[in-house]
């Protein structure tokens, strides 16, 4: 059962990470096992050569995993990334980036998931990441 829906997640981001409004990040779908997010195209995300930068792609993967975890455990600001491994598969188009995340395992202390990135309008993945989040014990959640 979800503890936070798409609107709750975006409101949480806005309250803890005010710069999210500049990025335009959106949660398009979230359920017990997955999340779909969008990072709107903006020239600030480009690197030389006209492609979406690696740091922008990593930020989208990390945010998708964070929110997918919070959707399950509630608003725990101190859940943190402990591992992010990303493989860049092809040059993304200068378009919106779509993240499709899947929770692989959610335990009491760790969450493990994967996120695949796509350029809008192209079903070929541009990046694939596996991530692990550390979940603080109840007494340390604040």
Image (cartoon, rainbow, N blue to C red):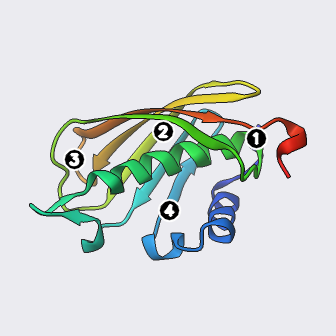
Mark 1 vs mark 4, foreground winner is 1
Residue 19 versus residue 69: which sits nearer the camera?
19
Residue 22 versus residue 124: which sits nearer the camera?
22
Q: CA distance from mark 2 to mark 1?
A: 16 Å
Q: Residue at x 34, y 51 (%)?
A: 57
Q: Earlier in the sequence, mark 2 or mark 1?
A: 1
Mark 3 vs mark 4, foreground winner is 4
| Tag shown at residue 136 | none
Residue projecting furthest to the bottom: 22
Q: Earlier in the sequence, mark 3 or mark 2?
A: 2
What residue sits right under mark 4 in the picture? 26
Q: Is residue 118 left or right of residue 62?
A: left
Instruction: Give the crowd class for mark 3: few <14, some 14-19, many >=20 residues within 10 Å.
Output: few
Residue projecting furthest to the right: 139
Q: Residue at x 47, y 53 (%)?
A: 37
Q: Earlier in the sequence, mark 1 or mark 4?
A: 4
Q: Is residue 46 left or right of residue 142?
A: left
In the displayed structure, would residue 105 be above or below residue 123? above
Q: Earlier in the sequence, mark 2 or mark 4?
A: 4
Instruction: Give the crowd class for mark 4: few <14, some 14-19, many >=20 residues within 10 Å.
Output: some
What residue sits right under mark 3 in the picture? 122
Q: CA distance from mark 2 to mark 4?
A: 14 Å
Q: CA distance from mark 3 to mark 4?
A: 19 Å
Q: Residue at x 77, y 47 (%)?
A: 74
What residue sits right under mark 1 in the picture? 73
Question: Is disc 4 placed on a helix, strand or loop?
Answer: strand
Q: Looking at the image, do the residues carrying marks 1 and 4 touch, with CB atoms under 8 Å apart?
A: no
In the displayed structure, would residue 14 be above or below residue 95? below
Question: Is disc 3 placed on a helix, strand or loop?
Answer: loop
| Tag shown at residue 101 | 2
């Amino acid at each position: 059962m979800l503890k936070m829906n798409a609107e709750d997640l975006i409101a949480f981001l806005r309250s803890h990470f005010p710069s999210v409004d500049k990025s335009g990040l959106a949660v398009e779908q979230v359920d017990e096992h997955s999340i779909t997010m969008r990072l709107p195209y903006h020239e600030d995300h480009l690197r030389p050569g006209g492609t979406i930068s690696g740091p922008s792609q990593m930020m989208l993967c990390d945010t998708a995993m964070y929110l997918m975890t919070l959707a399950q455990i509630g608003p725990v600001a101190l859940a943190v990334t402990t591992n992010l491994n990303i493989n860049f598969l092809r040059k993304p188009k200068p378009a919106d980036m779509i993240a499709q995340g899947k929770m692989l395992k959610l335990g009491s202390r760790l969450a493990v998931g994967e996120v695949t990135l796509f350029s809008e309008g192209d079903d070929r993945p541009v990046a694939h990441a596996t991530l692990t989040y550390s979940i603080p014990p109840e007494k340390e959640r604040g």
